[in-house]
């Protein structure tokens, strides 16, 4: 599965997050746990929900969920695309190049 197909798959899985039942149970969870559904808590619960939706969709379609992971090259390309978008929007960008010490040996 190429990067475009993986993104299309993720876009379809994301539709589950917009379902009223999912929105309702996430809101109920936040209320029960005593946190506002905003900022980092919202990001965290939505990330978990997105992964669950993606894995459930993959399993239902007979696809190994691990096949949906980005390759290192796809991840690098996606990071560069995000940086370019941010730069074009005027957001300052700082790049830290970390080298794995084991790779240097």
Image (cartoon, rainbow, N blue to C red):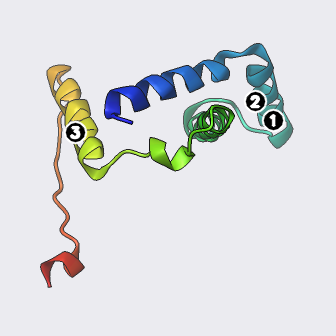
Q: Are marks 3 and 1 in contact (CB under 8 Å)?
A: no
* Residue found at x 63% / y 31%: 61
How many residues crowd mark 3 within 10 Å: few (<14), some (14–19), many (20+)? few
How many residues crowd mark 2 within 10 Å: few (<14), some (14–19), many (20+)? some
Q: Closer to the observer: label 3 or label 2?
A: 3
Q: Does residue 49 sit above or below 12 in this rendering?
A: below
* Residue found at x 61% / y 30%: 38
Separation of marks 3 and 1 at Cα, in angstroms: 35 Å
Based on the displayed image, in which of its 4 quarters is residue 81 positioned? top left
Residue on which disc 1 sits: 29
Q: Are marks 2 and 1 in contact (CB under 8 Å)?
A: yes
Residue 95 percent location from the top left of the image: 16, 49
Please give left or right for residue 103 compared with residue 68 in the image. left
* Residue found at x 57% / y 24%: 14
Please give left or right for residue 94 compared with residue 13 in the image. left
Q: What element carries label 2?
A: helix
Say which quadrant the C terminus sits in.
Answer: bottom left
Residue 6: assigned label: none
Viewer-nearest residue: 20 or 56: 56
Q: Is mark 1 on a helix, strand or loop?
A: helix
Residue on which disc 2 sits: 26
Residue 56 percent location from the top left of the image: 68, 36
- The answer to which of marks 3 and 2 sits earlier in the sequence is 2
Residue on which disc 3 sits: 77
């Amino acid at each position: 599965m190429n990067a475009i197909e993986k993104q299309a798959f993720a876009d379809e899985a994301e539709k589950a997050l917009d379902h009223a039942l999912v929105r309702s149970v996430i809101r109920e969870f936040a209320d029960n746990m005593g946190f506002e559904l905003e900022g980092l808590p919202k990001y965290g619960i939505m990330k978990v929900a997105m992964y669950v939706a993606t894995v459930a969709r993959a399993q239902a379609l007979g696809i190994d969920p691990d096949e949906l992971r980005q390759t290192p090259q796809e991840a690098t390309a996606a990071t560069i695309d995000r940086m370019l978008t941010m730069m074009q929007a005027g957001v300052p960008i700082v790049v830290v190049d970390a080298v794995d010490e084991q790779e240097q040996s």
